[in-house]
Amino acid sequence: SKENGRNCFSFYFEELKTDSNRVLALDGELRKAIENREFTLAFQPKICVETQNIIGLEALVRWKSEKLGFVSPAEFIEYAEESGLIIPLSEIIFELACEGYHKLVAAGYPKVPIAINVSSIHFQQQSFLESVQTILERNNTSAQNFEIEVTERTVMNTAQETISKLVKLKQLGFKLSIDDFGTGYSSLSYLVRFPLDVLKIDRSFIQHICSLDDKQAIVDAIIQMAHRLQIKVVAEGVENVQQVELLRSMGCDFIQGYYYSKPLPMDELIDFIHFWEVEHQG
Ligand code: C2E
Ligand code: CA
Ligand code: CA
Ligand code: CA
């Protein structure tokens, strides 16, 4: 029966999560993968609601392990954070993003910033700014071509150090976004202290936006307040045209989600951009 099926599934899932063999395998495989640089990036476009232009891309790490198969970043990033492997992994991700940027330029596409997700562990490192600058220089590119996505949780740390790091990133030329907004219980009045460009409303608010009035009210309020503070808004996880239309009516600036495109490998992304530009005539 359906009931049995569900029990079987959740049992299987729990078993995977707590299986210490898997954790051990993950540890060994991740170390090897970092040594051998077995990662790639997928890029997801962000679309401007008003102009339909692609205004940016988000880089999302992908790992296909020989032994474990495809492992979701939700799983291995968390593990990498706990084990400290996130530092070398983050550096690989930055390098790959720089490569991605050069490929995009070589393909002749308009320059849009590539957003990189920065783990709070990496962000909090004393050497964070220096390591990022070194990678940019080594790859002959500059901060203007990139955006940094930090989660609301990362910046909720009130330390003056956090604020000054964000200010320095901004001075270097990075755009700054707050990721997963709405999940970390911070208020916009609190975020005003940070030099933010963009706020990304978490998918959990967008998911039921058409059927749940309270989600709709929250998203509407976030957009209005962000705009009063000169901050742009991205809606994450948009999957259908009803959501697009509702978000448009609320004045949301940018949309990212499967409705437009899944995250794509660079080659496929270049095809997508080409198709998109033909459809929308530049
Ligand atoms: P995130 O930063 O919030 O990224 C958005 C996630 O939502 C991505 O999952 C993306 O593939 C997925 N997504 C995008 N549009 C839709 C949609 O319309 N519907 C649904 N259901 N999902 C959508 P992904 O790539 O599996 O990444 C999961 C999380 O892993 C990310 O959440 C981020 O927290 C972390 N992550 C991924 N790549 C990196 C990375 O390079 N560095 C770091 N530090 N974390 C990363
Ligand atoms: Ca993100
Ligand atoms: Ca997010
Ligand atoms: Ca998320």
Image (spheres, rainbow, N blue to C red):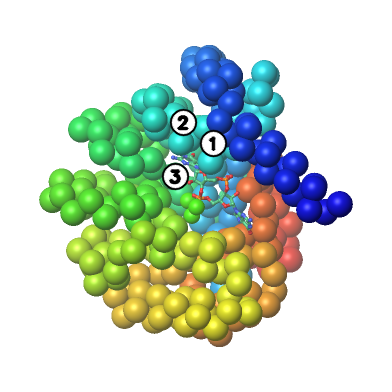
Residue nearest the viewer, comparing 97 with 191: 191
Taking the image as shown, residue 46 lies to the left or right of residue 11, namely left
Q: Earlier in the sequence, mark 1 or mark 3?
A: 1
Query: Assess mark 3: CB under 8 A from ligand 1?
Result: yes
Check residue 79 in the rendering and tell me which mark sits there, or answer none: 2
Q: Is residue 216 visible?
A: yes
Q: Are marks 3 and 2 in contact (CB under 8 Å)?
A: no
Vertical position of residue 217 compared to residue 73: above or below: below
What is the x, y in percent for residue 251?
Answer: 49, 81
Query: Assess mark 1: CB under 8 A from ligand 1?
Result: no
Write down the residue under mark 1: 75
Q: Residue at x 52, y 68 (%)?
A: 205
Furthest residue in direction left, as rendered: 160
Vertical position of residue 240 compared to residue 27: above or below: below
Taking the image as shown, residue 124 lies to the left or right of residue 207, namely left
The residue under label 1 is which amino acid type?
Answer: Glu
At mark 2, the secondary structure is helix
Judge the density around disc 3: few (<14), some (14-19), many (≥20) Cα neighbours within 10 Å. many
At mark 1, the secondary structure is helix
Check residue 116 in the rendering and tell me which mark sits there, or answer none: 3
Q: Residue at x 55, y 83 (%)?
A: 213
Check residue 85 in the rendering and tell me which mark sits there, or answer none: none
Alpha-carbon distance for marks 1 and 2? 6 Å
Query: Assess mark 2: CB under 8 A from ligand 1?
Result: no
- Mark 3 or 2: the one toward you: 2
